Amino acid sequence: MRMAIEPRMWRELGLSDEEYQRIVEAIGRDPTPTELAMFSVEWSEHCGYPRSRPLLALLPKEGKYTSPVEGGDAGGIEAAPGLTVLFKMESHNHPSQVEPFQGAATGVGGIIRDIFTMGARPIAVLDPLRFGELDQPMARYLFNGVVKGIAFYGNCLGIPTVGGELQFDDAYRGNCLVNVMALGVVRTDKIVSGRGTGVGNPVIIVGNSTGRDGIGGASILASHELAEDDEKRPTVQIGDPFTEKCLIEACLEALETGAIVAMKDMGAAGITCTTCEMSAAGGCGMDVELQKVPRREPGMEPWEILMSESQERMLLVAQKGKEDEVLGIFRKWGLNAVVIGQLTGDGLLRVRDNGEVVAEVEAKKLAEPPVYHLPAEEPAYYRACQAWDPSGLPTPKDMTAVLRDLLSSPNLASPEWVYRQYDHMVQTNTVVLPGGDAAVLRLKGYRQGIGVTADGNGRYCYLDPYLGTQLVLAEACRNLVCVGADPAGVTDCLNFGNPEKPDRFWQFKRSVEGLADACRFFELPVVSGNVSFYNEAADGAIYPTPVLGVVGVLEDVRRHCTAGFKRSGDVILLLGKTRDDLGGTEYLKHVHGLVTGRPPALDLDLERRVQRTCLEAVRAGLCASAHDCSSGGLAVALAECCMWGDTGARVTLPAGETEVRLDARLFGESPSRILISAAPDNAEKIREIAGRHGAPLELLGAVGGDSLTVLADGEPVIAAPVAELKKLWRSAIPRLMEG
């Protein structure tokens, strides 16, 4: 007998009355309580993307590098002949705000499973993070807990955390952002599908036991705004990295047998997600028995088993007759491994509990929710910010003091306090360590290597989401060419507020449009990604914050470059041109307390010319160092090159920029600029390359001494010992964390 459904039941599961009626129409009857729970998670924004999918279709899937993966848990590019690098980024924002250690730890575990579920061995993790200002105790608590959670899980797995980024702003005070990116490598012909095929093939659950942790995490916790009185710790999963390490090895070993047809990670929505999506993707059905699912808690209801987001679990489809071989491998590694059902040919997902059918729905209707075309409305603040005139902004008298102040900002200070807690050398693939423009990883057995970076700028995207997102992509690509990597593919993590508010959805819409246009221009596919909506708290929404992970290919990993100045006497060159760009800058916010203006103007063609010049010069071995000019502007970039190289420099600002305000020349964030140092004999060769590509190039000065000196119009405007600057820069975050 079917239990009557009351309105409070679907509302408690996060469904609206309209959505409930859509479910009734989809299946032609009232759903059972178990079916209702399944629809609530699969039709949530976190799993089904009903509000974002129409816009995500704009993002290009093809580019200048082959992308041999489609429709998997991750995507990738072929970085060397026959070798694919898989990568993906996801968010664990809401769980980390509720329980920072476990929220971040399980975020790492989940994104790594998305990599090895496709047959790839995970080789690296990156962690772009955002919190409130560090003078707030809550921000320090969240920051400390998140970093420790990432370190705990990644270090236990033996997977290096090689990069990331940090930003602190009041916009993230009530809703931190914890985005995690993972990469893995796999032979292209060994990539594993998530499509269930083969009627009669057994369905196997492997890994950890199922408990009540994480229930409702996808549909409720990640699909609604956070309120201060929310009691949601029960929805935060608990991670077990030792089990995940065994799961990685067992899965990769099982794949070597050739007996695995398909494999999928049990992330958001757990068994519901894997069973319905695997069936729908393969055009088949599935019949499963819940009483066969290993559980660690007695008395679990069918809907609890199906919605549980307990960690370290996978669903496999094996070839019929070979299941015992597969089961034996997982049990050898001390893991649960149980056949819970089989594939059918009727397209129905049939769920039994002690033989009784508690759910029977068409897999495709469950896995493919209806889409919503939401209204978009330009925010009230937008035009005022665009019209801001910097001419009335006072110019500081002491630019050296401004530089010291900026280097003490946690947004520009050394992130060493974070990455020192991570093992970034395990697996011995890390060639360029954290803290620079991009990490560089070797591909063992291959001449090629990869560069990887993750970038975002919520302030830019708040002021202009279309332009701001393009600036983020341009910066990420510059970071890669600085280390000698050709940008090849993108994964995105799109963090926004409540899409049901038209001004928030406008931000999302313009951001995706900007990303799509820029990716097409640079011939970059968006191979994977994640949308995180409802990032709002009682005091408002976060800045619209698209975070982009970009992977690039080095032709020869030995021909890489780093950012620090190397030799006294090397000349310092500036690729690109400085303009009067102060809107949205760290200088404007940190020194003047303003978040306004139009973000720096971006000429995509100039950006491409600058990138091509730098990449060719690095690959030719002409550059001693290369460093992107971005947050903090030219003065901060020069200081970073000096601090990384433990050497001084003496430079003169280009004479042709006298019409640009002095603070903009020093701290403005005009894009398409790269600082290069090179032996004097190589300077003319770099100039020839720049001329061929049509990229502006200026000689600024030379490396040497123990101070950074910057002259403008013949007068020193910045002069400071590098050791003093480095002390400020390295101590800023530790000092703030001590409270």
Image (cartoon, rainbow, N blue to C red):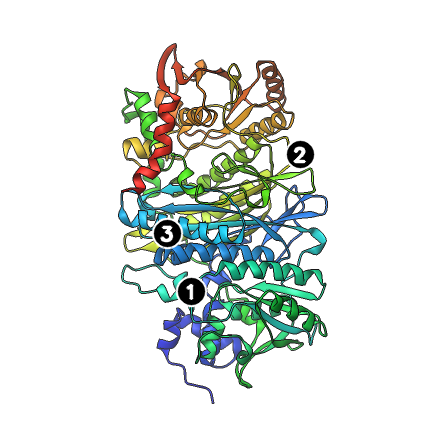
Q: Is residue 484 above or below residue 5?
A: above
Q: Amino acid at mark 3?
A: Gly
Where does the C terminus fall, quadrant-wise?
Answer: top left
Q: CA distance from mark 1 to mark 2?
A: 44 Å
Q: Is residue 517 above or below residue 534?
A: above
Instruction: Of the two numbered discs 3 and 2 on the same chain, state the one appearing first in sequence.
Output: 3
Instruction: Please provide percent x and percent y for residue 358.
Output: 51, 82
Q: Is residue 291 above or below residue 104?
A: below
Label 1 Cα neighbours within 10 Å, binned few <14 / some 14-19 / many ≥20: many
Q: Which residue is mark 1?
A: 217
Q: Are marks 3 and 2 in contact (CB under 8 Å)?
A: no
Foreground residue, 629 or 719?
719
Instruction: Of the two numbered discs 3 and 1 on the same chain, state the one appearing first in sequence.
Output: 3
Is residue 372 at all visible to an observer of this figure? no
Instruction: Of the two numbered discs 1 and 2 on the same chain, state the one appearing first in sequence.
Output: 1
Foreground residue, 170 or 183?
183
Q: Is residue 321 above or below residue 530?
A: below
Q: Which secondary structure, mark 3?
A: helix
Q: CA distance from mark 3 to mark 2?
A: 38 Å
Horizontal side of 45 relative to 623 (left or right) equals left
Q: Which residue is mark 2?
A: 556
Is residue 479 at all visible to an observer of this figure? yes
Q: Amino acid at mark 2?
A: Asp
Q: Nearer the viewer, mark 3 or mark 2?
A: 3
Q: Nearer the viewer, mark 3 or mark 1?
A: 3
Instruction: Please provide percent x and percent y for residue 421.
Output: 43, 44
Q: Amino acid at mark 1?
A: Gly
> Quadrant location of residue 520?
top right
What residue is shown at x 47% (from left), y 36% (from top)? 435
Q: Which secondary structure, mark 2?
A: loop
Q: Which residue is mark 3?
A: 145
